[in-house]
Image (spheres, rainbow, N blue to C red):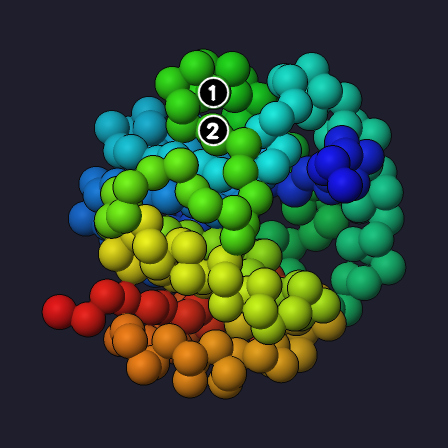
Amino acid sequence: MAFQLSSVVPWGRNLAEYREMFLLRDADLQQQIAGFGDGPASFNHQVTMAGGHVTSFDPIYQFSREQLAQRIEEVRAVVMQQMAENAGNYVWDRIPSLEALEAVRMAAMRDFLEDYEQGRAEKRYICHSLPERVPFPDGSFDIGLSSHFLLLYTTLGYDFHIAAITEMLRVCKEVRIFPLCDLDSNASEMIDAVIDRFSQTHSVEIRKTGYEFQKGADRLLRIRQKA
């Protein structure tokens, strides 16, 4: 079945959030980075403006700027209503209110939209769905990032996640996945199995981050090629 625009729920995060979620240091941001499932995040644009190199992969990049802008407006009120209904599942410290959250997310997505056409022309935004083969040679990227996708949507099944992470590791020397819980803030049911699988061939560790917006979502999984 073709990927439909009506299934897209745009929700963009910014560079500051990526830095905290993935424990990205200044030196990391100077490396070749691949972002999987980046969606309408402003991360790519902000890093590019600072002289860095990010390639973002997401199936939504098949759509035009106008289509994505319209979809953002279509779902904006619905998403905020859902956030209000589930406000107890979140930590309201860095982002103190629903109004502040909407402002942060909309600012990130507007930044993304401003960069989108140029980024697509420069092949910084590439339409792609894991676990399909990434159109790059082995080891093309130093760091691969997956934000709020892998291990979060446990209904996709173990085989999907193993195949997706395996493909990320083919093109990336290191993979970081955040967070390590499901949509209900419970520890991901497949994390132990994923760690067991990749510990056989890679260096694997769980690290606590300084970022927690969804309650319990404050850890990342780091998988690296063994020296």
Determine contact: label 2, label 1, CB under 8 Å: yes
Q: Is residue 67 left or right of residue 65?
A: right
Tell me the tag on residue 171: none
Q: Position of residue 147 (x, y in %)?
A: 52, 54
**Residue projecting furthest to the left:** 227
Q: Secondary structure at mark 1?
A: helix
Q: Position of residue 213 (x, y in %)?
A: 59, 62
Looking at the rendering, which quadrant does residue 226 occupy? bottom left
Q: Position of residue 227 (x, y in %)?
A: 13, 69
138 or 225, which is in the foreground? 138
Q: Position of residue 223 (x, y in %)?
A: 33, 68
186 or 111, which is in the foreground? 186
Residue 96 appears in the figure: yes
Amino acid marked by disc 1: Arg
Q: Is residue 111 above or below residue 212?
A: above
Mark-to-mark CA distance, 2 and 1: 5 Å
Quarter of the image where the N terminus is located: top right
Q: Residue at x 65, y 70 (%)?
A: 157
Q: Residue at x 40, y 54 (%)?
A: 168
Tell me the tag on residue 125: 2
Looking at the rendering, which quadrant does residue 176 occupy? bottom left
Sequence order check: which comes first, mark 2 or mark 1? 1
Amino acid marked by disc 2: Tyr
Tell me the tag on residue 120: 1
Q: Is residue 84 above or below residue 161?
A: above
Residue 15 appears in the figure: no
Q: Alpha-carbon neighbours of circle 2 within 10 Å: few (<14), some, or many (≥20)? A: many
Q: Residue at x 52, y 47 (%)?
A: 132
Q: Is residue 199 above or below residue 65?
A: below
